[in-house]
Image: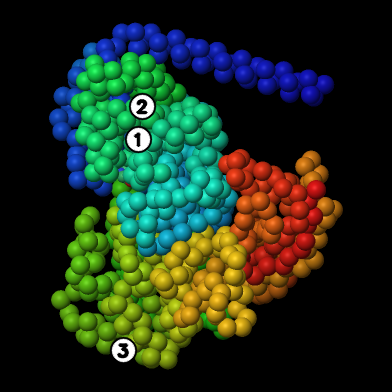
């Protein structure tokens, strides 16, 4: 009976969807029958009047172009009134009254800013991440936006690349889970709802693998590496029903992504069955000229032929496609297809039935930065912090005594939000000083000293301060600032040093060759360590940093990334033990830049070095170890978790015969806390060499002190698949190894046989 009902329900759902599609197709066909080729090309044009953009070009004569039907969408403006004004031009003054679609970079929150995405990924909490995207959608839609340029899912193994801050780190499994969660959070279950926005997965594809971590640099990679390690998060976003995809700046196999037919058509449309539209990145179409693909007309035709539907800012489509059509380089059918996809997106967003549905002063004033949103921002920020070190349990801090609060980021609003927080107001953020005052209570005496500038390096300051004075050098000499800080430290019971990067030392166009704490602050830290006072280092950073010296000399290190609007409160919650830290790294921290790229899912090589014997002739370095300083998945808690009793039942796996993996995790320390239990596998013998470990499952677990819980995972042969030489995911029977632990290094393990 139940089966019958399910089958009936499925049929009903399919029939309803079909009817809706038919209705949409009829509506769009009818509309397109009235459109000239110019108007169709106009729909493929995405412009920006400027503001919060990261390219050198901004669109001209936007109002007039809207009137002429030469614009499909607009990005870079926000707020119900401004968006309404622009929509009015399209609805009242253009011939066909086709609504515009409004986009923006809403990356980790709209006005309530959450931690940078790299920080969010360290929560390993897909439910919380989904909720952060839902809140961002609620705020963005109230502000008039239909479309957000997120999630950014580029796998990255090179922390020199500044955009690691925007993604979920180095692992395809974790990255895919987060990608799907974000899409669902933004889009909700019904895109026509006033508080739903269309998501745009980016940057398709492989942007995170730029040579030497240098921004916008060449990418060159084998297909096997792409399919197994770099493409899964984009695919996960597509499978979760994402409405749009943004093509990346880089080339793939020698052809820029924006003009790459294999990527945009063969893979995305034909293999993955993507049904939405593809937009270029900012001028990535016209940049194909500099790549060496021809003039604007040639690259525009190349892009349309490849499967690009919308051109962001280049206006190559607008200004050259008609000519290419005359010359037979492209067809009307191609223009029609692209136009239809853009119109479909507008239809699905409900814009044809109400072009003003997402502009609501009332909702904006009620929902944006509401108490609930801020409360959640504080919670998720606390979950994102990673405790890298805590010797002699100097954390959590006591709520009494004298704290020397030192560092250029200790009493600072400007840098709390992190990169890509274009609508966030730093003045609405909570500084670390304010957070500590809110949480510590009146028995704590705080002595503050800035101690150093974020950097004294004029080149770094100039290149960082492009969006405003994030690094504000003082007129005092470095010596004067330093001695004030040392004096404060000497008068205190404990030093909390808040150091690191300025917000825009990561993000787009923020590659660094030296990824240590800037020298001015290093000098400060060394002087503070010399005082012999116990020292806690709170770090602001948008990328893994090299912390070898700090790891040796500082008692405790808390990585707070850029925590967003509630950063200061959340940091204080963790420092004083109101929340026991639970973040786990989603990206390895190198011992030194020379190790990069260093990532946990590496291959064994023919001459693996296991640390025993001399270094010759092994795959290693003469001067540094192979292992990163802090591995993927790593992160301490104020309590301790022990892992025991790993069992596999049965110990034999085969297609349709899964295996239950069981073990017991016990909280053996003195605090209640949350652990992320991680399951990795290894396939030691395969037709294509496999990494030494690959994440396949994880589970979050809350344990009271002294409590034990049994953890269960189900493994199927799907979890043991890899990309074979045919570029298909395949399962090969044989022996496997299963590892479970609280990070990728410290694990318990068992054998598994596969038939
Ligand atoms: C360029 C960036 O690469 C992309 O991530 C962003 O969405 C666009 N600019 C629009 O601002």
- Tell me the mark number nearer the camera, choosing from 3 and 1: 1
Label 2, residues with CA under 10 Å away: few <14, some 14-19, many ≥20:
many
Q: Name the element at disc 2.
A: helix
Where in the figure is residue 667, as x and y percent of width and height? 70, 69
Residue on which disc 1 sits: 259
Ligand 1 within 8 Å of disc 2? The answer is no
Q: Position of residue 643 (x, y in %)?
A: 72, 68
Name the residue at 79% across, 24% down: 3
Q: Residue under label 2, please give it.
A: 305
Residue drawn where x is 41% and y is 56% of the image? 164
Point 54% across, 47% down: residue: 224
On the rendered image, what quadrant is the N terminus found in? Answer: top right
Image coordinates for residue 215, horizontal then vertical, percent = 32, 55
Within 10 Å of disc 3 (Cα), the crowding (few <14, some 14-19, many 20+) is some
Residue assigned mark 3: 487
Q: Give residue 536's position: percent from left, percent from top.
A: 45, 78
Tell whether label 1 touches label 3 (CB within 8 Å): no
Q: Does the image show residue 686?
A: yes
**Alpha carbon distance from label 3 to label 2:** 67 Å
């Amino acid at each position: 009976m139940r089966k019958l009902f399910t089958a009936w329900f499925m049929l009903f759902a399919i029939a309803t969807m079909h009817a809706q599609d038919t209705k949409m197709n009829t509506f769009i066909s009818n509309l397109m029958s009235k459109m000239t080729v110019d108007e169709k090309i106009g729909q493929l044009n995405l412009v920006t009047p400027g503001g919060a953009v990261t390219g050198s070009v901004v669109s001209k004569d936007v109002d007039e172009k809207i009137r002429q039907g030469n614009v499909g969408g607009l990005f870079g403006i926000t707020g119900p009134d401004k968006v309404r004004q622009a929509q009015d031009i399209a609805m009242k003054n253009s011939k066909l009254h086709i609504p515009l679609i409004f986009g923006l970079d809403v990356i980790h929150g709209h006005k309530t800013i959450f931690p940078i995405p790299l920080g969010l990924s360290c929560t390993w909490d897909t439910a919380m991440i989904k909720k952060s995207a839902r809140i961002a959608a609620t705020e963005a839609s109230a502000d008039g936006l239909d479309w957000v340029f997120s999630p950014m899912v580029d796998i990255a193994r090179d922390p020199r690349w500044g955009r690691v801050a925007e993604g979920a780190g180095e692992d395809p499994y974790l990255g895919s889970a987060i990608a799907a969660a974000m899409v669902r959070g933004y889009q909700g279950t019904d895109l026509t709802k006033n508080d739903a926005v269309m998501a745009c997965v980016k940057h398709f594809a492989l942007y995170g693998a730029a040579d030497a971590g240098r921004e916008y640099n060449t990418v060159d990679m084998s297909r096997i590496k792409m399919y197994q390690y770099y493409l899964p998060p984009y695919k996960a976003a597509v499978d979760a029903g994402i409405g749009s995809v943004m093509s990346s700046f880089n080339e793939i196999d020698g052809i820029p992504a924006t003009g790459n037919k294999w990527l945009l058509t063969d893979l995305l449309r034909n293999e993955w069955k993507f049904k939405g539209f593809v937009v270029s990145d900012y001028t990535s179409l016209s940049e194909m000229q500099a790549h060496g693909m021809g003039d604007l007309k040639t690259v525009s035709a190349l892009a349309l032929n490849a499967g690009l539907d919308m051109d962001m800012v280049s206006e190559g489509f607008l200004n050259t496609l008609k000519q290419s059509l005359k010359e037979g380089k492209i067809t009307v059918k191609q223009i029609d297809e692209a136009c239809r996809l853009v119109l479909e997106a507008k239809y699905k967003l409900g814009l044809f039935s109400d072009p003003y549905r997402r502009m609501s002063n009332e909702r904006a004033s009620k929902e944006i930065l509401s108490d609930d949103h801020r409360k959640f921002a504080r919670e998720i920020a606390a979950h994102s912090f990673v405790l890298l070190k805590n010797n002699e349990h100097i954390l959590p801090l006591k709520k009494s005594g004298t704290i020397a609060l030192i560092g250029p980021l200790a009493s600072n609003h400007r840098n709390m939000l992190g990169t890509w927080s274009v609508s966030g107001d730093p003045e609405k953020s909570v500084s670390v000083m304010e957070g500590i005052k809110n949480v510590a209570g009146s028995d704590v005496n705080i002595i503050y000293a800035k101690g150093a500038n974020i950097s004294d390096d004029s080149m770094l300051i100039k290149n960082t301060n492009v969006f405003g004075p994030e690094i504000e050098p003082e007129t005092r000499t470095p010596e004067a600032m330093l001695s004030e800080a040392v004096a404060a430290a000497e008068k205190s019971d404990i030093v909390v040093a808040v150091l690191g990067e300025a917000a825009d030392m990561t993000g787009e166009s923020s590659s660094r060759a030296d990824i240590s704490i800037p020298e001015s602050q290093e000098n400060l830290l060394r002087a503070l360590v010399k005082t012999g006072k116990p020292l806690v280092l709170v770090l602001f950073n948008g990328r893994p940093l090299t912390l070898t010296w700090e790891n040796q000399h500082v008692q405790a290190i808390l990585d707070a990334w850029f925590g967003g609007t509630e950063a200061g409160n959340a940091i204080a919650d963790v420092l004083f033990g109101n929340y026991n830290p639970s973040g786990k790294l989603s990206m390895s921290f190198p011992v030194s830049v020379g190790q990069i790229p260093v990532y946990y899912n590496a291959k064994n090589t023919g001459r693996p070095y296991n640390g025993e014997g001399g270094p010759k002739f092994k795959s290693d370095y003469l001067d540094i170890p192979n292992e990163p300083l802090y591995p993927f998945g790593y992160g301490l808690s104020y309590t301790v978790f022990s892992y025991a009793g790993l069992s596999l039942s049965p110990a034999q796996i085969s297609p349709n015969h899964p295996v239950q993996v069981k073990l017991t995790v016990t909280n053996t320390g003195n605090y209640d806390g949350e652990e992320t239990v991680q399951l990795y596998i290894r396939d030691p013998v395969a037709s294509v060499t496999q990494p030494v470990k690959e994440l396949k499952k994880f589970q979050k677990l809350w344990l009271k002190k002294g409590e034990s819980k049994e953890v269960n995972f189900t493994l199927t042969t799907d979890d043991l698949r890899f990309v074979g030489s045919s570029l298909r995911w395949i399962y090969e029977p044989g022996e496997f190894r299963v590892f479970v632990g609280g990070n990728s290094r410290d694990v318990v393990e068992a054998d598994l046989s596969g038939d």
